[in-house]
Amino acid sequence: MTRFFLLPWTWNPAVTLSALLALAAYIIAFRVNRRIGWFAAGLVVLLFTLQSPLNTLANGYLFSAHMVQHILLLLIVPALLLLGLPRSLSLSLRPRLLGRPAAGWLAGVGAMWFWHAPVLCNAAASSRFVFALQTLSLLVLGSLFWWQILAPREEDRLSPPGAVLYLLSACVTCSVLGIIITFSPVAVCPVYTQKPAHHLPIMETLRTDWGISPQRDQQIGGLLMWVPMCLIYLAAIFAQLARWFARTPDPEAKEVS
């Protein structure tokens, strides 16, 4: 684990500046409030995802690192940023897509299927422009997905039963993709089976000492989508169940009153 943090950090001035500008814009718009911690946490996770050794390994070295990066960009960062928005926020010019659960569901689930087509997966791992496009699309599509669950105003969110169905179906669909990737005899992203041009010393440790062959690396990536990713959906489902029960009136309380 120590060697992981000794790998090169890919400092990106554009990413750092964007995060600082986003935080400044938040403070100007909403001032410092109780929910700023969520928003700041989202920006910290974003910086870690795109500039830490995780990004180095995802850049053509490990498919499993690429999968962790996808999960963070699609599910974790957008959720934290939305949790950071004040509950009183009202969008006067709200895009129509935000009010359509089907569009949000297709955005969140479709992003994973779309970017794991072999051609697109290879392109994102090989081209900085395609990777930037992929990153931006994951953040936007993830925000569309989570808006139906975490919109600032209660009336903009799905009802608890609808939210449970929304999340459960997304969990099942992404699990199917994870199973396909885990057991596929063909490389989903062939670029990760090749030796990168700038070979890192840690790759010898991963391949020899840890036994992480390209095939096993793909299996780990598939399992990451299959299990941890679904656990994120399940955690959100439990939160919606708690919200549902909290809104259910207590018959005994009515009788007493």
Image: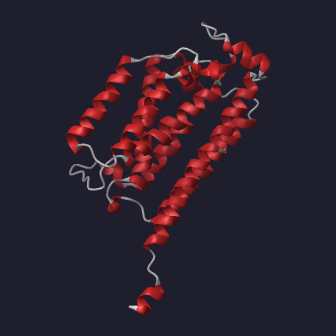
Q: Where is residue 27 shown, x and y percent of the image?
A: 24, 39
- The quadrant holding residue 62 is top right
Q: Residue at x 45, y 29 (%)?
A: 135
Say whether residue 186 is visible: no
Quadrant of the rendering where the N terminus is positioned: top right
Q: Is residue 49 above or below residue 168?
A: above
With 148 as the anchor, is 124 left or right in this view? right
Residue drawn at (46%, 82%), measured in percent from left and top? 250
Q: Residue at x 36, y 53 (%)?
A: 151
Q: Residue at x 50, y 59 (%)?
A: 239
**Quadrant in the picture for residue 116:** top right
- Using the image as rendered, state which of residue 171 and residue 73 is in the foreground: 73
Question: 175 or 151, which is in the foreground?
Answer: 151
Quadrant in which the C terminus is drawn:
bottom left
238 versus 254 height, above or below: above
Which percent across, then down, holds residue 243? 46, 65
Q: Is residue 65 left or right of residue 210?
A: left
**Picture layout, residue 83 above or below residue 77:** below
Front-most of residues 35 and 170: 35
- Residue 34 seen by the camera: yes
